[in-house]
C-alpha cells in the first residue's frame, strides 16, 4: 500500500511549480474588466480558510460569518480562530468588523478586524457570483486557502439541520501530526446526535472499528444564532472521545466546522453536507491530497462506476508524489455503501472509506501509514476543448520545494479553444504579488480528463492535468517535479 502523510495545509479542495521572480517587471495584468462591484458582495456570508502560520510554522484554521453592506464595509460578524503556538491560540465567537473592495473582474480584498485578535486578517478573493467566492489569506502573518458563501438564514435552526449529515475534516492531532476524519451522523430536530460512524487517519494510524467504522456514541448540536448561523457541536466516538466544534450554517445542506478544543487537542476543520442519496452510479471526477513522509502528494482522476459495485473501464488516476509523477494509471476495483451511509472503495492502488453526500462523495484513505482525503463529484455533460469557455474564478493551494506553502486566486477567461488569459494574486510564504498577468492552455478529452494543461504567470509556470465535473467546475492537480498542489475553476455568473 502507498505510504504517505497529509500535507501540513491539508489541500482541499483546490497547484504551482517552484516559484521564482515573483512580481517580475512587465508582469502586471492591467486594469481589471467585468461587471462586479462592491454591491456584488452584500449580505451575510460564512467563510473558512486553513493554512500555515508563518511565525510558528504550524497549521491553523479560521471560520466565521460576516455581514457585507454592499458599499465596502463589513458591518458585523463573528470569527473563531484555532492557531496553536500563536499569541492567541484559541479565539471563539469574537465580534468582527472590517472593510472590502471588489474589482470589476470579481477579485477583491478585505480586512477583517476581530476583537481579541493580535492583528488584522487580510484576505484576497475572487467572486464566482454574488453568493460564492474563493479566498486566500493575503498578509505576512500567514498563508491559507478557503471559501466564502452566502448564508441561508431560514436554515439557522435545528429543525432545518435535522437528518443525516456527512462530514470531512482535516488538520493536525495533539502532537501536530496530520489527522483527517470523515463520517456521517444523524441529528434530530432537538439537536441530539442519535447515531453515527466515522473513519480517522491520525498520522497514518487508522481508527475504523475493525473495518466497519468508529461508532459515534453521543453528540449534540446547539441551536445556531439567528443573527449569523453560528452554533456549537460535540461528537463523542468510541476511539477518540469527545471533540467540540463551532459550526456556521451555509444552508440546510451544508455547515462549516472548526474544532475549538484548547491545546493540546487536535486542530480540525472542514464541512458537513446533507447525506442525500447513497447510491453511486456513473462517472466521477476527483482530487485527493496527502504526503509521503515529508514530501507532499496529490492525485486526481476519473472514476467510472457501473451502479452495481464495480469500477469499470476508462477509470484513471494521475499522481504527483513529492515531485515523482505517474500519470494515466488504470484503476480497477469495487465499491459498496452500507445502510449507515459509510462505504468502501477498494482500488488496485489503495483502499478508501467513502461517504456520499450532496457535496460529493467524501473520501478518506484507510490504508495504514496514510493520511489522504478529498472529494469525488459526479460528472455531467459532454467534454471537449469547448467545455471550458467563458469567465472563471480559480483557486490553488500547494507546497513549492522545499516546503513553502503558496495560495492563490485567479480570474481567467477561456476562449473555448484551449486558451486562457487573466490575472493572478498569490501569497508565497508571506511574499505577496497581486494582479500578475496570466496565460494558460486547456485540452479536454471526451472523458473530461485534460493532460498537457498550462497555467503560467511571472510567479511560476505550472503543468497541470484537468478533470472536468461539468462546464462550470474544473478540478486539477499540478504535475511538475518541484511542487505539489491542487486546485479548481468555477464559472463566474
Image: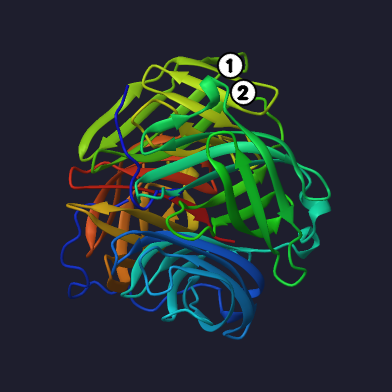
Residue for point 34% across, 77% down: 30
Query: Quarter holding the C terminus?
Result: bottom right
SS of the residue under disc 2: loop
Q: Quadrant of residue 79?
A: bottom right
For the residue pair 102 and 32, the one nearer the viewer reads as: 102
Q: How many marks?
A: 2
Left or right: 477 in relation to 267:
left
Q: Where 51 falls versus 471 (above or below)?
A: below
Residue 371 visible in image? yes
Left or right: 11 in relation to 339:
left
Q: Earlier in the sequence, mark 2 or mark 1?
A: 2
Counting from the top left corner in percent of width and height, residue 346 is at 47, 18
Q: How is the image coloured?
A: rainbow
For the residue pair 38 and 145, the one nearer the viewer reads as: 145
Report crowding for label 2: few under 14, some 14 to 19, many 20 or more residues within 10 A (C-alpha).
some
Q: Are marks 2 and 1 in contact (CB under 8 Å)?
A: yes
Counting from the top left corner in percent of width and height, residue 464 is at 31, 44
Residue 423 visible in image? no
For label 1, the residue is: 306
Counting from the top left corner in percent of width and height, residue 18 is at 19, 54
Counting from the top left corner in percent of width and height, residue 371 is at 38, 37
Report crowding for label 1: few under 14, some 14 to 19, many 20 or more residues within 10 A (C-alpha).
some
Residue for point 52% across, 27% down: 208
For label 2, the residue is: 281
For the residue pair 28 and 15, the one nearer the viewer reads as: 15
Q: CA distance from mark 2 to mark 1?
A: 6 Å
Q: Where 108 falls versus 377 (above or below)?
A: below
SS of the residue under disc 1: loop
Q: Quadrant of residue 362?
A: top right
Q: Which mark is residue 62?
A: none
Amino acid at each position: 500500500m502507498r505510504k504517505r502523510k497529509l500535507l501540513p495545509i491539508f489541500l482541499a479542495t483546490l497547484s504551482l511549480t517552484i516559484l521564482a521572480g515573483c512580481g517580475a517587471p512587465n508582469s502586471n495584468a492591467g486594469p481589471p474588466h467585468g461587471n462586479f462591484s462592491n454591491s456584488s458582495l452584500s449580505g451575510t456570508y460564512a467563510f473558512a480558510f486553513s493554512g500555515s502560520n508563518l511565525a510558528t510554522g504550524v497549521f491553523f484554521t479560521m471560520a466565521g460569518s460576516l455581514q457585507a453592506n454592499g458599499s465596502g464595509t463589513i458591518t458585523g460578524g463573528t470569527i473563531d480562530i484555532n492557531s496553536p503556538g500563536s499569541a492567541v491560540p484559541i479565539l471563539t465567537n469574537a465580534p468582527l468588523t472590517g472593510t472590502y473592495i471588489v474589482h470589476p473582474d470579481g477579485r477583491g480584498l478585505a480586512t477583517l478586524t476581530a476583537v481579541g485578535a493580535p492583528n488584522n486578517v487580510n484576505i484576497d478573493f475572487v467572486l464566482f457570483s454574488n453568493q460564492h467566492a474563493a479566498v486566500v489569506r493575503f498578509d505576512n502573518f500567514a498563508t491559507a486557502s478557503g471559501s466564502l458563501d452566502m448564508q441561508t438564514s431560514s436554515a439557522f435552526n435545528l429543525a432545518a439541520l435535522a437528518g443525516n449529515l456527512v462530514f470531512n475534516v482535516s488538520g493536525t492531532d495533539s502532537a501536530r501530526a496530520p489527522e483527517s476524519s470523515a463520517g456521517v451522523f444523524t441529528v434530530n430536530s432537538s439537536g441530539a446526535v442519535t447515531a453515527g460512524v466515522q473513519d480517522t487517519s491520525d498520522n497514518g494510524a487508522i481508527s475504523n472499528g475493525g473495518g466497519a467504522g468508529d461508532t459515534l456514541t453521543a453528540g449534540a448540536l446547539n441551536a445556531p444564532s439567528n443573527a449569523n448561523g453560528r452554533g456549537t457541536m460535540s461528537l463523542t466516538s468510541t476511539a477518540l472521545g469527545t471533540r467540540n466544534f463551532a459550526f456556521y450554517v451555509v444552508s440546510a445542506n451544508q455547515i462549516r466546522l472548526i474544532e475549538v478544543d484548547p491545546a493540546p487537542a487536535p486542530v480540525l476543520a472542514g464541512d458537513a453536507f446533507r447525506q442525500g442519496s447513497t447510491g453511486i452510479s456513473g462517472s466521477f471526477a476527483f482530487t485527493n491530497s496527502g504526503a509521503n513522509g515529508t514530501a507532499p502528494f496529490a492525485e486526481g482522476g476519473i472514476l467510472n462506476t457501473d451502479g452495481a459495485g464495480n469500477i469499470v473501464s476508462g477509470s484513471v488516476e494521475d499522481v504527483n508524489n513529492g515531485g515523482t509523477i505517474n500519470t494515466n494509471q488504470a484503476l480497477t476495483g469495487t465499491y459498496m455503501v452500507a445502510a449507515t451511509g459509510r462505504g468502501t472503495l477498494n482500488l488496485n492502488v489503495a483502499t478508501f472509506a467513502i461517504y456520499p453526500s450532496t457535496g460529493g462523495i467524501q473520501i478518506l484513505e484507510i490504508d495504514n501509514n496514510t493520511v489522504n482525503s478529498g472529494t469525488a463529484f459526479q460528472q455531467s455533460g459532454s467534454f471537449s476543448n469547448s467545455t471550458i469557455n467563458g469567465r472563471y474564478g480559480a483557486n490553488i493551494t500547494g507546497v513549492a520545494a522545499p516546503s513553502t506553502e503558496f495560495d492563490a486566486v485567479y480570474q481567467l477567461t477561456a476562449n473555448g479553444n484551449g486558451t486562457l488569459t487573466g490575472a493572478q494574486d498569490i501569497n508565497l510564504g508571506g511574499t505577496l504579488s497581486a494582479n500578475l498577468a496570466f496565460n494558460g492552455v486547456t485540452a479536454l478529452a471526451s472523458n473530461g480528463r485534460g493532460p498537457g494543461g498550462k497555467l503560467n504567470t511571472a510567479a511560476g509556470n505550472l503543468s497541470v492535468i484537468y478533470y472536468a465535473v461539468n462546464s462550470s467546475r474544473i478540478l486539477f492537480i499540478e504535475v511538475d517535479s518541484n511542487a505539489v498542489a491542487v486546485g479548481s475553476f468555477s464559472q463566474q455568473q
